[in-house]
Amino acid sequence: MAGNTAFVTGANTFQIEMLKKHTDEEFDELCFEFGLELDEITSEKEIISREQGDTKASGASDVILYKIDVPANRYDLLCLEGLVRGLQVFKNKLEVPRYKRVSPLSGEPQKLIITKETEAVRPHAVAAVLRNITFTQERYDSFIELQEKLHQNICRKRSLVAIGTHDLDTISGPFTYTAKRPGDISFKPLNQTKEYTATQLMSLYKTDSHLRHYLHIIEDKPLYPVIYDSNGVVLSMPPIINGDHSKISLKTKNVFIECTATDQTKAKTVLDMMVTMFSEYCAQPFTVEEAEVVYPDGKTCIYPELAYRKEKLSGKFINQKVGINESTEKIAHLLTRMCLLSQATGAGDEIEVEIPPTRSDIIHACDIMEDAAIAYGFNNITRTTPRTYTVANQFPLNKLTELLRQDLAAAGFTEALNFALCSQEDIAEKLGKKISEMRAVHISNPKTAEFQVARTTLLPGLLKTIAANRKMPLPLKLFEISDVVLKDETKDVGARNSRRFCAVYYNKSPGFEVIHGLLDRTMQLLEVKPARGEGYHIQTADDSTFFPGRCADIFVRGKNVGRLGVLHPDVINRFELTMPCSALEMDIEPFL
């Protein structure tokens, strides 16, 4: 799984008493014990100097940066607050925090009303309030940085979720999340001096190095999402930009957080992550004020969910999987160190594990087992000899493929390796067939016309290779042994791979005898004799890809395994070739 890089500044890190006592080497070891990797200890000045030269780095900061590689599924470690909290719990310096959702001390909770117009663009939204929060410059920077890291990670560059944070004291609820035509939306965006319509903003940000990457998410939509307060003030136009009116600052005391999304589960996870990481700076630490979301059908939901759930598993399961032999009490303690509050239930070796809202990565019992292994220490697991000895062998189909490759090359043919994806035209129209008749697996959202379907035959790839090498001296003799993909309703994925062998001969004369001779040599290598019944033979066939009367099916032990012949002139022309060409293609799996 891909990772994320978290930069931890030296000033912030060493304000924590627990980390004050650690040298760089000890901190590196601590990260390793916690399942992380300290990539390097550097500074902004050093990074710029390395990438752009000393002259560019002259005014950069000398503050020490700890570059830590964080697993992509550990969203709770993407900011300094979550990282330090996790390390403190791991070192038994801090108890696992309990996150609570609370009602407002006075009045009704903030309300976010979703209209039906949003269904066509971003239908989901969640919200919450961080009440009486205290920001410092470091906390503020960390708050903004976490949003950006989540946007790049779980939010998939804002396509799934977009986070908006607002100074609640500058706006007035209830809030309305709706969608309007671009020309009907007008507001002053963040860090701008005048108002723009949404249409003008899309033009303005086309040259913005940061925001231009998100414009494609909504620019082709007839309606753009927008959030208003009760006075008509625009909070944000997700997923592009927030309004300048409600921007947060160091003086902000109450933060209204909204997340709009195309995936509700992801939105709830992102909201939980934002509020749990920074609720420790509220007047009541680790409490989050609830907000009410009203859906178009009138249904209401309270957010954030901050849902705790409990899982039960046996100590035997963890001991066996990790390769240790510890008591249930010791295992429960190990899991608690990983922020998974656990206890032995007393029913045999059963352990009850509480999954907090910060650990959305815990999906299965194996995830809990992995955390137990991390807490135990991979270096502390005793190295053991496997109870069962196994001897590996090459996969038979691959072994046969490798053996054939050697001898086909010795026969004077050059191997080609082509893409497994191709255009619909390559496997259908160019070969004189209809795409509806092909058992082709289609790509639902192809990025280019060249990669629309999975190939059902190797022939087009070899013909395109010849077309790209027409200047080479004749004859051109190519072969390929690779997989094709065919639809198959009997398979659980609806398709299967089939290993094929294909060869082509391109010269001033068709050279059918060369291809036929290659078939005979291949059968000799496969130890199949030329005879009907238990051997192989060829039989006249009709195929629009081949010249009439110059095509034959290949039968092995009574089963049709392939076809050979002289290609039809129309097929040759469609692949931009000018000389005759003979081809052979057959399935090699029946020979195993």
Image: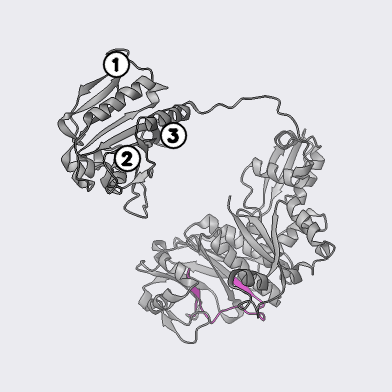
Residue found 46% across the figure and 68% down from its top: 213
Q: Which residue is mark 1?
A: 530
Give whichever of 17, 431 is nearer the camera: 431
**Residue 317 shows up from this direction:** yes
Q: Residue at left 38%, top 45%?
A: 419
Give the mark toward the camera: 3 or 2: 2
- Kindly identify the amino acid type of the residue bearing the numbered disc 3: Asp
Q: CA distance from mark 1 to mark 3?
A: 38 Å
Please tell me how crowded label 2 is: few (under 14), some (14-19), or many (20+) other residues with Cα within 10 Å: many
Residue range (magenta)? 233-256
Locate the C terminus and report the quarter of the image it occupies. Answer: top left
Q: Is residue 389 left or right of residue 181?
A: right
> Label 1 amino acid?
Pro
Residue topped by disc 3: 492
276, 3: nearer the viewer: 3
Is the image coloured rainbow, by chain, by secondary structure, or in one colour?
one colour
- Residue that protrudes farthest toward the right in the picture: 21
Magenta span includes 366: no
- Left or right: where 423 falls relative to 237: left
Identify which amino acid the numbered label 2 is placed on: Ala
Work out whether 412 lies above or below 175: above
- Mark 3 or 2, nearer chain start: 2
Secondary structure under tag 3 reads loop
Query: What numbered label is drawn on residue 440?
Result: 2
Q: Against 206, is 74 above or below?
A: above
Element at badge 2? Answer: loop
| Residue 246 falls within the magenta-colored stretch | yes
The alpha-carbon separation of the residues under discs 3 and 2 comes to 16 Å
Quarter assignment of residue 72: bottom right
Marks 1 and 3: which is nearer the front? 1
